[in-house]
Image (spheres, rainbow, N blue to C red):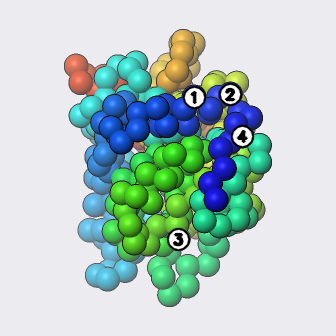
Amino acid sequence: MIHVVADDPDVRGFEEYYAAVGPDLARIPWAALRPHPELVAWLDTLAAAAPAGHPAAATGGCTAGGRPADTGGSPAEAGGSPAGAGRGAADAGGSPADARGSSAAGAGGRTALVIGCGLGDDAEEVARRGWRVTAFDAAPTAIRWCLRRFPGSPVEYRVADLFALPDTTYDLVVEINTIQALPPGRRPATIAAIAATVAPGGTLFVRCLAREDDTPPRGRPWPVSRAELAAFGDAGLRMRSFADTPATRRTSRHFCAVYERA
């Protein structure tokens, strides 16, 4: 049974929006219905260096560029759907304790987590590359759509709360536009929670809207500063690569960063 996470006002509106659009998924401004191009490009660099038939070793750097649908300050950049659900999130076909997988990969390949997975396109792309993927979102309707869009998928889709995940970790963590979807006052807790999902030796891929350190964020989506991203270092991660892509007529300025845990 899928339960609605209704006690977090920062997230409730996303579930309401998913529910309101019904089957017309093209109306969801942050859902491109395809994997994020920068994630695809980064995964391509991993695949080029990986042995045939095995998940890519999580190395490589960010590439510049953006999603064609991005528009400066528009709802399209609100995030894939925020993963920080609220207190007491439940799951879609399992217990809340299953919202993360073990960092022990086993025969199924190395483990990956997609945070705030939205409609599932990024998770499916990572799984296609050979990773053993868990993907979660705060919005139950989004997870229902993942299960409908990708029947028989190897991805474990869950409804879960970023701030109440079990204490397990992953070899690869993908975070695209979740940080900016939650209010700046929750940013330290958001970054700490994301960092906590990265296993020793693991890698974190981050993509977010960008702003200068001295420019205050004015409204959702709230762009992220480099000073705020430095909190990943405080959480024990080392930045491996960083790209600052300027705004264009079709894309907003954004950061892409890759971190690793020793």
Mark 1–mark 3 Cα distance, whole angstroms, equals 30 Å
Q: Are marks 1 and 4 in contact (CB under 8 Å)?
A: no
Mark 2–mark 3 Cα distance, whole angstroms, equals 31 Å
Q: Is residue 234 left or right of residue 58?
A: right
Residue 83 vertical placement versus 109 (above, below): above
- Residue 246: image x %, image y %? 32, 25
Q: Which residue is mark 4?
A: 86
- Residue 31: image x %, image y %? 37, 39
Q: Which residue is mark 1?
A: 13
The earlier-in-sequence mark between 2 and 4 is 2
Task: Return the mark for residue 51.
Answer: none
User: At numbered mark 4, what does the secondary structure look like: helix, strand or loop?
Assistant: loop
Is disc 1 surrounded by few (<14), some (14 to 19) or many (20+) residues within 10 Å?
few
- Residue 221: image x %, image y %? 50, 24
Please name the amino acid that badge 4 sits on: Gly
Please name the amino acid that badge 2 sits on: Pro
Please name the amino acid that badge 1 sits on: Gly
| Residue under the point 60% across and 65% down | 93
1 or 4: mark nearer the eye: 1
Please name the amino acid that badge 3 sits on: Thr
Location of the C terminus by quadrant is: bottom right
Q: Which residue is mark 3?
A: 111
Q: Is residue 67 left or right of residue 122?
A: left
Q: Which residue is mark 2?
A: 9
Mark 1–mark 4 Cα distance, whole angstroms, equals 12 Å
Give whichever of 256, 85 is nearer the camera.
85
2 or 3: mark nearer the eye: 2
3 or 4: mark nearer the eye: 4
Q: Is residue 158 left or right of residue 176?
A: right
Q: Are marks 1 and 2 in contact (CB under 8 Å)?
A: yes
Mark 1–mark 2 Cα distance, whole angstroms, equals 7 Å
User: At numbered mark 3, what does the secondary structure look like: helix, strand or loop?
Assistant: strand
